[in-house]
Amino acid sequence: MNREDRIKELISQMTLEEKVSQLMYISPAVNRLGIPEYNWWNECLHGVARAGVATVFPQAIALAATFDEDCVYSVADAISDEARAKYNEAIKQGNRGQYWGLTFWTPNINIFRDPRWGRGQETYGEDPYLTSRIGTAFVQGLQGDDPDNLKLAACAKHYAVHSGPEKLRHTFDALVSKKDLFETYLPAFKALVDAGVESVMGAYNRTLGEPCCGSYFLLQEILRETWNFKGHVVSDCWAIRDFHENHQVTNSPEESAALALNAGCDLNCGCTYPMLTVSVKKGLVTEDAIDLALTRLLRTRFKLGMFEPIGSGTYDRLGREVINCEKHRRIALNTAEKSIVLLKNDKGLLPLDSSAKKITVVGPAAANAHALFGNYFGIAPRFITILEGLAEKTKDKFGVNIEYRQGCLMHSDNHFSNVEFGEANPADIFIAVMGLDGAIEGEEGDAIASDSNGDRTNIELPPWQLKFLQKVRAVGKPVILVLTGGSPIAIPEDIADAIIFAWYPGEQGGKAVADIIFGDVVPSGKLPITFPVSTAQLPPYEDYSMKGRTYRYMTEKPLYPFGFGLSYTSFNFDSITLSAPSIRAGDSVIAAVTVSNTGKRKADEVVQIYITRNDRSSDEPLSALRAFRRVYIPAGESIVVEFELPSAAFETINAEGTSVLLPGSYTVIAADAAPVSAATEKGAPAPATAKIIVE
């Protein structure tokens, strides 16, 4: 009997109550039919989370900062090895509880449209194309290369138009134009559906008046009918209860359950779907609709091998020896090193050389392991803080003395300060480690130091940290500022001689930062989100229009542009040539970019391809990322990097939400940051450009 026939046979033997029980995230066993108990809720945003020891990789926003699909795939592949190993061990012990299963509610591919959103750290940044590529690589690493026999089941969330405010997510209606919807908020979801993602999670909020987990427009018209999604849909946790309690679009739990199921939500994380038995009796939903949802859910479980003899599956051999193994720790370190972004390096202060004999490390993030985690994290046997990484790096450097003073608090102003930096404490250089951690930004309920449910009311460095940093700066010695966090932090540009953005770099983060500072690794990370100068540059937080947001629509000069990141060597974008002077629908053109490493260090560079329409209207993007590739270039050498650009790369989304290819003149831009003046002013090489006609 084939898989589909087995599913039909199981469903035909189940009572209504048994069927409904299997639509809950805690699905009880149906022993008489050989259906084992299963809990669908598992997390692996940047490592297996909430299930004991696991390798903790850099936070999702840092994964995007690598601009490296192969690297992201290797992270997800390592995570799926550990997840399978944990599941195998749990099954042997009879543990079928939460966080030990094979269906993982990852990745978060929402667009980080506003840097105040505390959960923006979970995303891959502000750009739909980058998010699509990084998200696809992550899903492929989690699910494996056999769509009929999944390693894990990944989940694209939160569908759709979801990026704060966190405080209002249970009541908020995200109003958005069709242009912004199909140009910005939906492309990554479509890309992951095209890549075979097994699950999609609906968001808490409403979009265009409909609750996302009960939206016929989102779940049926777009997801099922237009994109032909074949997997299952899960609600965000207790989101269906919000229908009647908060959104007030229904009057009772049975109405809410019926609305969600009829719209295409198959699985309820929450407490509402048991009322489907009442919904059936009241004629609000049919048993056939329940059978359809159950078919999708059982199909996922069959793909994961849950109905095959234990030990017979492809991945059943994976055991506890792979959990936090040396190979995975190396991947975590390599990823952290690739993700760290060098924002400033006046007079080549970095990397540090042997002339720095006394180093004073200050700041509340230096010895703070929470600055490594990000949210949704596992537990590693060892987390290397930035202070520990620096200490390890200098322990064998004869004559180098390293000291540490916290100096100020992470989450509030000091009650008093006894730190003075005068003649009694001379230092050759200060390394100040400041910024954010998960107590300030994150999901509602987790960010315990936040007064805005995990969001930030402003994006500036916390004022008590800035005040202390100004005190350090006043000593007159060189200052290296290391910032931790998952979102842009606005700072005065003259506050330090060198600035490193480390994100939440994971268990190996301290070693990675030290490797960068002392030059064992050349920095190569790029910003996946624009850093504004100040909060004043941002549109109102609750406004979901893209006007004035992200590098594609922001007309003011940013502090640091999307795609920006300095190196210890120098690069030139010598030229870009196109294989044809024009392009028409259905064709493609090859863009060949010559890039030279004109410095003295071998290093990686991220070549980014942007396209702009020369006669664009005011509601079209200033430019749009259409391709990127991380490449290695030896010192003093040049390479040619080729990109195939399909005609779709030149398309525009119109007011009706339709993709159209408008004739006219376009510019193809090769650069290592978004093409705004701030990039070259801050040390990025000048871009190379080429004109092309779209016929």
Image: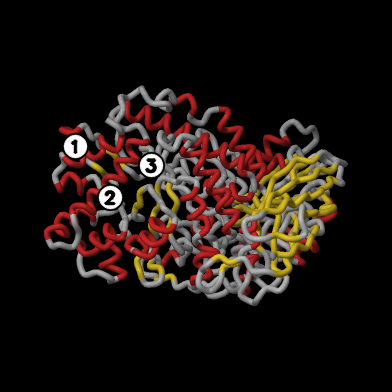
Identify which amino acid the numbered label 3 is placed on.
Answer: Thr
In this view, the residue in front, 682 or 619, is: 619
Identify which amino acid the numbered label 2 is placed on.
Answer: Ala
Q: Secondary structure at mark 1?
A: loop
Locate the N terminus and report the quarter of the image it occupies. Answer: top left
Is 376 situated above or below 488? above
The answer to the question of whether label 3 and label 1 lie on touching residues, with beta carbons closer than 8 A, is no
As measured in the structure, the alpha-carbon distance from the residue carrying label 2 to the one carrying label 1 is: 17 Å
In front of the other: label 2 or label 3? 2
Residue occupying image coordinates x 77% and y 33%: 397
In this view, the residue in front, 386 or 30, is: 30
Q: Position of residue 312 (x, y in %)?
A: 36, 23
In this view, the residue in front, 459 or 186, is: 186
Q: Which residue is mark 2?
A: 293
Locate the C terminus and report the quarter of the image it occupies. Answer: bottom right
Q: Which residue is mark 3?
A: 103
In this view, the residue in front, 690 or 389, is: 690
Q: Earlier in the sequence, mark 3 or mark 1?
A: 1
The answer to the question of whether label 2 and label 3 lie on touching residues, with beta carbons closer than 8 A, is no
As measured in the structure, the alpha-carbon distance from the residue carrying label 2 to the one carrying label 3 is: 16 Å
Identify which amino acid the numbered label 1 is placed on.
Answer: Val
**Quick check: can you spot residue 370?**
no
Q: Which residue is mark 1?
A: 30
Residue occupying image coordinates x 57% and y 33%: 329
